[in-house]
Amino acid sequence: MIDGPPNTPFDGAPGASPAREVTGAQILCEALIREGVAVLFGIPGGCIMPFYHALWEYRSQLRHVLVRHEQGGGHAAEGYARATGRVGVCIGTSGPGATNLVTPIADAWMDGTPLVAITGQVPSHLLGTDAFQETDITGITVPITKHNYLVTRAADIPRVVREAFHIAQTGRPGPVLIDITKDAQQERCVPDWDVRMDLPGYRPASRRADFAAVQAIEAAVGALLNARRPLVLAGNGVMQANASHALRRFAERTGMPVVTTLHGLGAMPHDHPLMLGMPGMHGWVHVNRAIQQCDVLFNIGSRFDDRVTGKVSAFAPHARVIHVDIDAAEIGKLVTAHIGILGDARDVLETITPRISVQPERFAPWRAEIAALKAAFAPRQHYRRSERTAPLMPQDVFAAFNAVADTRRDWRVVTDVGQHQMWAAQLIDWQRARSHITSGGAGTMGFAVPAALGAAIADPAHTVWAFCGDGGFQMTACELATIRQEGLGNVKVAVVNNGYLGMVRQWQQLFEGRRYSETPLSGPDFALLAQAHGWHAITVDDVADAEAAIREAWAHHGPVLIDFRVEREANVFPMVPAGRAIHDMVHDEAHHDQQLRERQRRESPMGDSRVAPRTAWRTPHTTEQA
């Protein structure tokens, strides 16, 4: 082993047993290396300080990124995990350091992102005494982790770390928390690396098909062979299983059309003739109507989120539902599964595809019917410019991005949460798996900038674009400093700036009589803010300058922020109002006003069909943006 100071790292390759006692903090560093960890995102503090003391000696093997806020560290670890498929790791101290990680842990829980969060805790003898910065973080995170640990002995660290990484990345991926007391980090022992995992009750679906899965697959094959109007719904499970190629082979062999959820974007190229688009609350009309008319719905790796289904009782009313999921709890949880298959998406697709012997042209009439729906509803017509709009519309930003990005393959996009997120999902030409990263289930504003940081470190060969609204951007803008500190020239931030909390304002306009309560949003000059952090910055307020700005940002060898000052009251359409079936969509503002008049006419005894006049905010953006 080693002869030297207590914090000298272990000699030799991972797996070699040391010959002498070392600290729990050293053991933790070595355990992380043995799990293949290369990057950590975190902030030091009192109760995690022994780990950081040991980390200094491992800095050639473990790259630590000093973020400006623990929430940013957690989202950066998520971005790293989503870009690579590997476990992301974030670090925090006890008390507020740990609680600041709760939001990214919850985000990872909702979106099935493999994450290990490591927190320091007060010494064992102070547990339960309300000591300085003591917080029961294991108790807090029980509902939002796959498992969590409170470690009070250095000897337990090798087993706990091994188990944590196994749990985080097997079955449906998700977050695991390891809370380690300060004295366990300081305690010295001879680590035992030949430990066995002790996980009673944890039995994730294996790659080996059991009898029940074989029977279910046979039933699914029969249902698909007898279908006349089949539809494939691909979700995040396709991404997690690296099954995009398997999905494409299945679709091309069978001729069955495919729709993808928000997290499934990129699983099929957007311009593939069998790719229809995204369903749900802000999906396309023809996609939602295809779901409502299909006779077999083959769901691969989607959990039937309410933003996809709308009113569940009215979802896919004519369909025999086949649900493939790695998590048994998801099958039949929200939508009745006539056939449930527990398994990995790629394994199931690769098993089923050779057994489907149909001519792809068999479904040509069904595809033609969907194409007619698409032509009739002209899915992008509601984004045509009108005379009253500002010189730059949100769709202009994404059209300009496509004009540049379509000539390249070296990019990923991370989006924040809100209107811009839906515009990006609808309008960007998604071509590849894992090119789209967003916060879906939790809908976490502030996700994009730190997640882009993590993705950029994971994939330095690609340019990572973070699309944000002005509201979400201001929540984690402090991580601009981290990106500059790390020398990440491959991060570009595009702020779709409308001076509002845009999605909330849209709902207030459409459903709350235009009472814009606490949604007008002030902010600094974002270009000056970025420049203060050492970034190159551009301000754009006219469509004529949008594409040139994106080209300039892409060509600049360093981080760039573009402040796109867009029309303030542009809305995302189509949309399904809350509580309605997905075929009952609002196509545009005129359609909404018509529906409102009809509803008022039905509900008012006087037949009053008045609708409040629509106002257009044309106020120029200023530093106040009032």
Image (cartoon, helix red, strand yellow):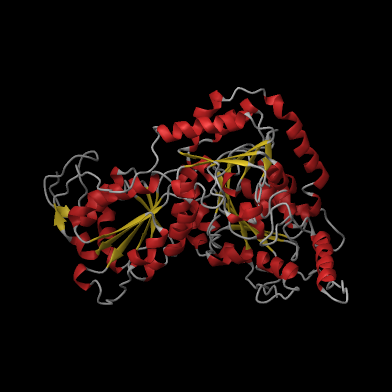
Quick one: quadrant of the N terminus? top left
Quick one: quadrant of the C terminus? bottom right
- Above or below — where is 86 with respect to 100? above
Q: Is residue 125 left or right of residue 312?
A: left
In front here: 141 or 419?
A: 141
In front here: 81 or 296?
A: 296
Q: Is residue 547 left or right of residue 119?
A: right
Quarter of the figure with residue 295: top right
Residue drawn at (58%, 43%) of the image: 411
Residue drawn at (23%, 49%) of the image: 158
In the rendered image, residue 161, in percent from the top left (x then y), is placed at: 28, 50
In front here: 158 or 200?
A: 200
In the rendered image, residue 374, in percent from the top left (x then y), is placed at: 78, 42
Q: Is residue 472 left or right of residue 351?
A: right
For the question of whether residue 461 can be seen, the reply is no
Q: Is residue 598 left or right of residue 441?
A: right
In the rendered image, residue 16, in percent from the top left (x then y), is placed at: 19, 39
In the rendered image, residue 437, in percent from the top left (x then y), is placed at: 55, 49
For the question of whether residue 447 can be seen, the reply is yes
Residue drawn at (84%, 67%) of the image: 597
Quarter of the figure with residue 100: bottom left
- Above or below — where is 214 with respect to 540? above
Task: Please tell me how many numbered marks the rendered image carries.
Answer: 0
